[in-house]
Amino acid sequence: MHPLRVPKKLPAGPFLKWAGGKTQLLKQLQPYLHAGMKQGQVKEYCEPFLGGGAVFFHLAQKYKLKSATLYDINRELVLVYRVVQDKVDELIYALQAIAGKYSKLNEEKRKAFFYRVRKDYNRTPLRGDSFKRLESKRIARAAEMLFLNRTCYNGLFRLNSKGLFNVPFGKYANPRICNIKNLQAASRCLQVAEIRVCDFGKIKPASVRDSFVYLDPPYRPLSKTSSFNSYHHTPFNDTEQIRLAKMVKKFARAGARVLLSNSDPRNTNPKDDFFEKLYKDFQINRVRAGRLINSNGQARALINELVITNYR
Ligand SMILES: C[S@@+](CC[C@H](N)C(=O)[O-])C[C@H]1O[C@@H](n2cnc3c(N)ncnc32)[C@H](O)[C@@H]1O
């Protein structure tokens, strides 16, 4: 196989559609980045809730990160990142093969094709240490995951109680399944990274002592029906937000510069002080997100989001 030739300087961005992706919030986050990060004095970057990685890709390129540790609890997501990191050409060939077959079909046949790939993908869900044992099949699996992500409904990644991917077909006229240049560019950014499956609670505070840590957990829902936050079979409820705040404080005590984003409960309840209590020794800033609120009567209002730091 010939390596794919791609010009060196192409910008990289997320290669997955991911619920809660931060591409739209980068501009608002920029002023709140730690000064040391901007001046290149903080050498280590850590992101415990990687998802689509919008912030990592932005920082990796803007500040030429030398070292990053990226975590997510989602094994399938981490598998794809690792394949993009070290087998990107093989991945592109596998993905192009799937995309080529798909693009020749009419809508009805595309739908059937999607469900066939989904069935195949669900035959071997990653569990326990199967992550390591999958070695020989990981490129095919990563290609299937990228295909499903691009063609499923809203690019959601959702598993049922048996750990199977259950998002339906998405009906897009022309989905961009294989963006070769972006995958190549993303792979280059990922060369500085260590990417691990990990619950945030297992990260050792001492390991982030010299780091800038950006945390983008599943957002606290603004209403019972509003945001998607079921990334994992354990719901990210208030108990999880409290467990996270304890961890964030440990990171801060260890010496990390911490920046955390979350939803602002005051969008829907001006008296809600959940985060004010939880992060009372931190700076709590509010930024205007480009999203509209979608609950009772306030349908057209722009929403605030919280940007919480342990520095000024
Ligand atoms: C809001 S998304 C992150 C989005 C990301 N910043 C982006 O730009 O796409 C939250 C991520 O946290 C992960 N997650 C959920 N619970 C977790 C936990 N306990 N530990 C680590 N990661 C977790 C989810 O799998 C999901 O990818």
Image (tube, rainbow, N blue to C red):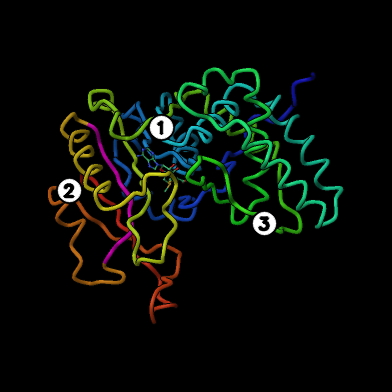
Q: Which residue in the structure is indicated by mark 3?
A: 170
Q: Which residue in the structure is indicated by mark 2?
A: 282
The picture places residue 298, in percent across and down from the top left corner, at: 38, 79
Asked which secondary structure carries label 1, the reply is strand
Where is residue 139, by image quadrant? top right
Where is residue 272, by image quadrant? bottom left
Q: Is residue 225 above or below residue 203?
A: below
Magenta-colored span: 256-265
Q: Is residue 179 left or right of residue 31?
A: right
Classed neighbour count for the residue bearing mark 1: other residues with Cα under 10 Å, few (<14), some (14–19), many (≥20): many
**Label 2, label 3: how far apart the Cα atoms are:** 41 Å
The picture places residue 35, in percent across and down from the top left corner, at: 29, 40
Q: Which residue in the structure is indicated by mark 1?
A: 71
Q: Are marks 2 and 3 in contact (CB under 8 Å)?
A: no
Q: Earlier in the sequence, mark 2 or mark 3?
A: 3
Q: Amino acid at mark 2?
A: Phe
Q: Earlier in the sequence, mark 1 or mark 2?
A: 1
| Ligand 1, image quadrant it occupies | top left
Asked which secondary structure carries label 3, the reply is loop
Q: Is mark 1 within 8 Å of ligand 1?
A: yes
Q: Amino acid at mark 1?
A: Tyr
Q: Nearer the viewer, mark 2 or mark 3?
A: 3
Q: Nearer the viewer, mark 3 or mark 1?
A: 3
Q: Amino acid at mark 3?
A: Gly
The residue positioned 50% from the left and 38% from the top of the image is 57
Q: Is residue 238 left or right of residue 280?
A: right
Magenta-drawn stretch contains 299: no
